[in-house]
Amino acid sequence: MKSIVQEILKEYPNAGYDSLIPILQHVQEKMGFLSEESVVEVSKYLKMPASKIFGVATFYNQFRFTQPGKYHVQVCRGTACHVLGSATVLDEIEKNLKIKSGQTTRDKLFSLEVVACIGACGLAPVISINGEFHAKVSSETIKTIFQDYKSREVQP
Amino acid sequence: MNLTIEVNNNTLQASQGETILDVLSRNGMKVPTLCYMKGLFPTGSCRMCVVEVEGRRNLVTACSEPVLDGMKIMTHSMRVIESRKTIVELLLSNHPDDCLYCERNGSCELQKLSEDLNVRERRISGNKNNYKLDVSSTSIVRDPAKCILCGRCVRVCEEIEGVTAIEFVGRGSKTFIDTSFNHGLNLSSCVNCGQCIMVCPTGALKEKPHINEIKNNLSNPDKVVVVQYAPSISVSLAEEFGFKPGQNIIGLMNAALRRIGFNFVFDTSFSADLTIMEEASELVHRVTNGGVLPMITSCCPGWVKYAEEFGHDILPNLSSCKSPQQMMGAIIKSYFAESEGIAPENIYSVSVMPCTAKKFEQQREEMTQNGISDVDAVLTTRELARLIRMYGIDIHKMEPELADSPLGTRSSAGKIFGSSGGVMEAAIRTAHYLITGKEMVKFQVKALRGLQGRKEAHIQIGDLNVGVAVVSGLKNAAELLEEVRNGRDDIHFIEVMACPGGCINGGGQPIGTDEEAVKARMATLYDIDEKDAIKASHKNPYIVELYDKFLGKPLGHKSHHLLHTHYQKREVN
């Protein structure tokens, strides 16, 4: 069976270095993140060292290198959220989930991402979990929000 | 010289297409640089070399700005000096304060710049980054905390070596240099050539030290500690002790090594002769029996790893000969051990190499006999200098001594191994004898000498016209191999060295090695060759004796067992 990456690469015949970013975006769209294996496959296809691709991909915020969790948490760090204390919120989430931004919890339940602005400044500080917005969060409400998500998993 | 420019109120002549920096350095005017690398395209990213140009609002980078007719330049105006000083202060703002413990204390460009610009306090304090040391590699230690992101290692790795093991990772203030997926050098495509160390301005890159193990073994009375040194060491070590570049201090070095406590001192040039006996025989065998051609040398461990990673298809072309270091190691723990009546496991075998990749080669599993390593530890030229100082030896006061016999006696063919083209020249001398039964009339093959990245020649040996090519810098090797893959068939023998110019410019050589120093070292090697009586490996009487008494004949059973190896495909990313 051909890998997903091979299928994607078929759509880029005679690709040069300039196709790198569109290919990476395509891979991430299909697989949710850039795995090491997929970077190596792209590297072989484009005849471009994997270290170079890694360098390009880490330059951009949009690329992830870990598998997203079942619940993907986005913490807004835009100006309005920042003013209303999103730094503390992020800190609290990192402590709560025991992961840093860009990582996924061991049980693959949560992944954490810092985003610049999700266009909901009126709700600041705001986080989004799988697209569902949680408005005016604080260190206290964070605990209950995540407890809620965790308890959904325990019940069958 | 069709342009006239004015620098600091002096009129200078310049040519179209020259950069400001070109003109300044040609006229002995010094402007500090960091990211600039001679011979590579300027990036102008560090802004250390800024100068003031009349009529220009902003300072311009001398390394990348072409000169224009009538340009008026100030290289050390108040504004320029302040600007450079601020850059250094910013670089220092997150730099570790451990100069006293740093490998590069005294040879650090950042230290030199802050000294030159009279930086006397920490004016700007930044967040220290806490990157981990990368000690995964057998050869090179990376300390990203000391990295100032000049990018020279990244460029040398990509543009000279064609390896690209390291790259800028991340963005903005979080940028640092790392391998693919932060796996560390050991799992990367790094070939351990050490050219990154040679270009690093700070202590962010250094060799993996073997000094402590060697000290321990030197003080162990049960061990017989032997040392061998590569052909290029005697012409480069001198610079570490204030001699002029290229001076041959082989006698003083022998004496110093004995004072340190090495029981036997051998010359790797002897086993270079041995390599030639085997390699030339292999070439003749391949040529006369329709073997795989072109044959490619295998002395350079950086090149061998590169071939294993990027050139699986040409692995059958590689000579099966071990490198001189490993041949010497194997002979020490077999022939020498036998004749001296020492058990191989009681010998601690050290080699001094101009090379960091030799530290990788030494621990390859193929390089063992019955579970005993051929070579136990490898020192770079720099580490040897450190060892000599540590043992309180004033090399200037030594009386020259000879290396130990028989493994310390060489022909001059073995000596020129240190220079790009030397292995080929030595091999041609012996191959000529093996094919025609006659010595070459003129031993020198001048076309193969010099610092060019690629040298080619066609040599008439009897009825055969042998095409040979010499490349140094792996990018040059890759280009030549591509030609061979595309059907070029006039080349029968290729010498590849990973470092530009060969071992005299190796990754283990003294920091600060420049083109002049490399030229001087090369000139000395060929001068030794010119003056030596025995110019071909097969005429080295001790080599003849070694075959008579022990090995039998080149490519024979014992040779095959001790002196030859095989290669494996390596998957890297």
Image: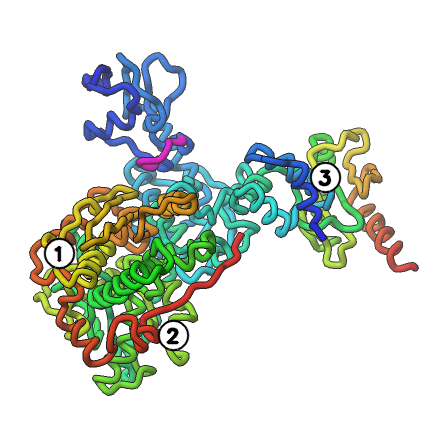
According to the picture, the residue beneath numbered tag 1 turns out to be B440
The outermost residue toward the right is: A156
Please tell me in which quadrant of the rendered image residue A20 appears. Answer: top right
Q: Secondary structure at mark 3?
A: helix
In the rendered structure, find residue B57 and report the number of the disc placed on it: none
Residue pictured at 63% horizontal, 52% vertical = A37
Please give the label number shown on residue B368. 2
Q: Residues within 10 Å of mark 1 (few under 14, many from 20)?
A: some
How far across and down, in percent of the image, does residue A86 sit? 72, 39
Instruction: Tell me if residue B148 can be seen.
Output: no
Mark 3 and mark 2: span between their CA atoms? 59 Å
Span shown in magenta = B37-43
User: Which element is circle 2 on?
Assistant: strand
Which amino acid type is shown beneath numbered disc 3?
Ser
User: Are discs 1 and 2 located on one and the same chain?
Assistant: yes
Q: Nearer the viewer, mark 1 or mark 2?
A: 1
**How far, Cα to Cα, is label 1 from label 2?**
37 Å
Quadrant of the image containing the N terminus of chain B: top left
Residue sticking out furthest to the front: B463
- The mark that comes first in sequence, 1 or 2, is 2
Inspect the magenta stretch and tell me whether residue B39 lies in it: yes
Q: Count the labels in the image.
A: 3
Q: Nearer the viewer, mark 1 or mark 3?
A: 1
Q: Amino acid at mark 1?
A: Met
The disc numbered 1 marks a residue on which chain?
B
Q: Are marks 3 and 2 in contact (CB under 8 Å)?
A: no
Disc 3: which residue: A86
Percent across and percent down for residue B307 are 42, 55
